[in-house]
Amino acid sequence: MKRTPAHAYLGFGSNLEERRENITNGLAMLRESGQVKIIKISSLYETEPMGYTRQGLFLNAVALVETDLSPQDLLSLCKSVEVQLGRKPTVRWGPRILDIDILMYFMESGDTLPSDSENVIQVELDTQALTLPHPRMWERGFVIIPLAEVSPNLLMADGRRIKSLIQDFRMWTGLRLFETGPWWQEVGVNCKGWQIMRFAEVESTNTIAVNLASFGAPEGTCIIAETQSAGRGRRGRLWHSPSGGLWLSILLRPKIQSPDVGWLSLIAGVAVSSAIRDTFQLPAVVKWPNDVLVSGKKVCGILPETRFIGDEMDFAVVGIGVNVAIDTSLLPRKVQETSATLVSPDHPFASEAREALTVSLLDNFSLLYRQFLSEGFSGILQEVKEYCDTLGREVIVSHLGMPVHGIAVDIDSDAGLIIRTESGEDIHVMSGEVSIRVPGAGYACE
Ligand code: BT5
């Protein structure tokens, strides 16, 4: 009888020469051995070295693989790949071309993945050559975060799911997202694909993304800046972007004809709200069409910009600004009254928290965007409605230059807001300034 293949998690690390290529070459060699099938790979993370710290930054990733090899034979294969790629003996935790560790190894009694706990047996080993599970993996953010990305539902010994560790911002110490997606396409697995470009200070991440798009940059390019000197809001308004916030722009190239981009703002709004809920356990909601609020205060603004050639969209840039850990006293007094930051800039893990939010946000955005492309806006409408706090509220929206007053009763299949006026007429508004009536206090938020 043919044995059901085992599953293993492998950790990859490289901090010498072409780090990214070292890891992709290692993955390709494992696959080409014919004895390892690569099922899923995490994003690439750049991490500060531990132990021997006078060396360059590492790139790390985790892969889930399927194999017929025993743990010992899998280890031999990994070590021979390291050697073929030029790894030389070095000090413990010293610089290396490529390190491949077996983190965990699961035997299956059925055709299941390790996150389905019932049919799997985790192999435990303690020999001189190999200890399983890897003895130090739980203390290492550069293992846990990518592992949680690959298998968020993996059960830990204490019964918790590994995804719960993502919210422990200490895990993100010394870690930042380097690249997701295309880096491992070469090894033959599909991906979700964000190519991250980081800047210290820019005028506006949207301006950079629009320029790159005009020069042919691909879908999935993502610009992140520490600060913006001329961040933009809608209609020429200023977006204040001190350090501590997440200021990013995503480049998309959907082949669609509708000139209206309300769906883009709403996808981004849901992706941000859901990421804030997961990462900070704060009750984030979408205020139609382009804000995210926590307890009535604006914590995020969204700015889509598009270019069409003829009837077809050439590109869309979605600018997203999130006040993750900003000093709100740097904002003008009036803006302070309507806005908030998710955590204080003095939070000991503020920058780690921002990194965790970024990864979660990009993951959510990918899922929603792909669903939108395959099913249209109606495919994500229900989720949008669940996050949209504007529904059921008394609002005033400026529509065709005139204020429309009524109750926001629904969102239509074009992402427009349906407002029922006092006379019972339903007016569909495509985008606009929404003021929400706070009982007993006039209209709030713009
Ligand atoms: C927005 O415009 O809310 C869209 C903001 C988009 C910002 C991102 S950051 C990355 C990317 N690059 C850019 O240059 N832009 C995007 P709007 O709905 O027009 O709201 C602008 C108004 O929000 C301003 O007039 C202020 O009242 C308020 N505001 C400005 N900065 C803020 C902040 N940091 N937090 C909260 N509110 C702010």
Image (cartoon, rainbow, N blue to C red):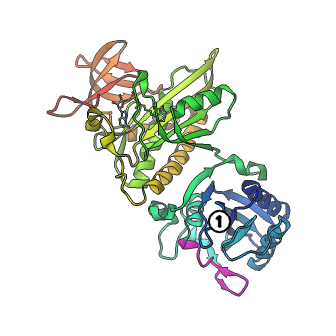
Front position in the image: 312 or 350: 350
Q: Is residue 137 magenta?
A: yes
Label 1: how many Cα within 10 Å (few below 14, some 14–19, many 20+)? some
Which image quadrant shows ligand 1? top left
The x and y percentages for residue 199 are: 56, 42
Residue 304, given in percent of the width and then of the height, sits at 50, 28
Q: Which residue is mark 1?
A: 112
> Residue 210 is drawn in which quadrant?
top right
Q: Residue at x 78, y 61 (%)?
A: 26
Relative to residue 27, is residue 387 drawn left or right? left
Q: Residue furthest bottom?
A: 127
The image shows residue 169 at horizontal and vertical percentages of 45, 61
Q: In this orientation, does residue 342 appear?
A: yes
Q: Which residues are magenta?
A: 123-139
Residue 301, image quadrant: top left
- Helix, strand or loop under label 1: loop
Indicate left or right for 57 with 429 as reference.
right
Residue occupying the far front of the picture: 54
Type of amino acid under label 1: Thr
Q: Which image quadrant: the N terminus?
A: bottom right
State whether residue 40 is above or below residue 244: below
- Residue at image point 65% right, 65% down: 112
Name the outermost residue toward the left: 440
Compared to residue 58, the image places residue 382 above or below, namely above
